[in-house]
Image (cartoon, rainbow, N blue to C red):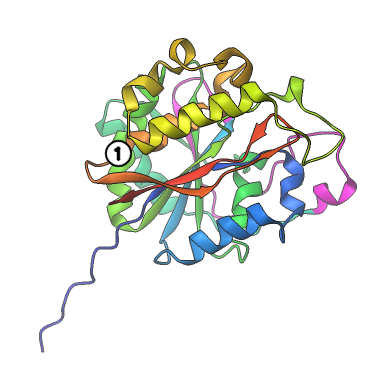
Amino acid sequence: MNVQPSPRISQPALFISHGAPTLALETEGEYAGALRAFCAALPPPRALVVFSGHFQEPAPIRITSGARPPLLYDFGGFPEEMYRIRYDAPGDPELASEIRVLLDRAGIGAALDPGRPWDHGAWVPLRLAFPDARVPVVEVSIPSGASPEKLLQVGTALAPLREKNVLVIGSGGIVHNLRRVSHSSTSARVEPWAVEFDRWVADRLAAMEVEPLLSYASLAPNAVLAVPTPEHFDPLFVVLGTRNESDRAVPIYEGFQYGTLSLRSFALQRG
């Protein structure tokens, strides 16, 4: 009897917002529902590889390689229940080693980090998107101070993982200005400058115009307000680096919280 090889499963790459940490408590909210529904419709992934705006380190790139990484509660002043949240997904040491090899082959220095916990930029959106916590997770650091072009190279180096049933996720925020948030309500009036920048990015993504996005700081309206520091925007470039010629940007969710935190999320999927 001839044994047929297992079919190759291709996954999209996702950019998802992690907003305020308290999103972790809104498991029945509209945003959580959109993430959960989208991810539930995907072929079950082998693993998740996450780039978070809260894991930025000097070179070499760090890769979580523990079998059961703990959670890092890297925030303060929130309700006590936030510090009791669990997300008990397994790590994937084998995949971590595979990621290191891919980065090394691309001339990008990388090292395994068996003791690194998952920060809230990873576990908050994963708790919403994959609530059963069964899919293995590897978190990869973003090289601090790297240019958008360098971050594209990181994504390109890891693009082969998408063809091996691995879901690559960038977790951050298209607009993320904590200094201008409205603490009165999650549904506070959205600042016009935030809407304009968010829409500019969405339009570039819809047309797959990557070059203007690389120069967002000088080309996009209100970039200084929308991206006062780059760490939440940086994961976008890693995700775009994984793209292939047939990919298009598929919206997952569009909206804001607290007036200046964009929850815009999308998938790069073959058209």
Q: Is residue 119 visible?
A: no
Residue 238 among those drawn in magenta = no
- The correct choice, above or below, for 113 with respect to 71 in the image is above
Q: Nearer the viewer, residue 22 or 246?
A: 246
Residue 214 percent location from the top left of the image: 38, 20
Q: Amino acid at mark 1?
A: Leu
Q: Looking at the figure, which quarter contains the N terminus?
A: bottom left
Q: Which residue is mark 1?
A: 102
Which element is circle 1 on? helix
Q: Left or right: 97 with respect to 121? A: left
- The correct choice, above or below, for 106 with respect to 81 in the image is above
User: Which residue is painted at 64% across and 52% down in the image?
Assistant: 31
User: Which residue is painted at 64% across and 28% down in the image?
Assistant: 176
Q: Which residues are magenta?
A: 55-84
Residue 204 percent location from the top left of the image: 39, 30
Q: Left or right: 248 with respect to 77? A: left
Residue 175 percent location from the top left of the image: 60, 28
Residue 177 percent location from the top left of the image: 68, 23
Instruction: State the predominant SS element of the stretch in magenta.
Output: loop
Q: Nearer the viewer, residue 82 or 220?
A: 220
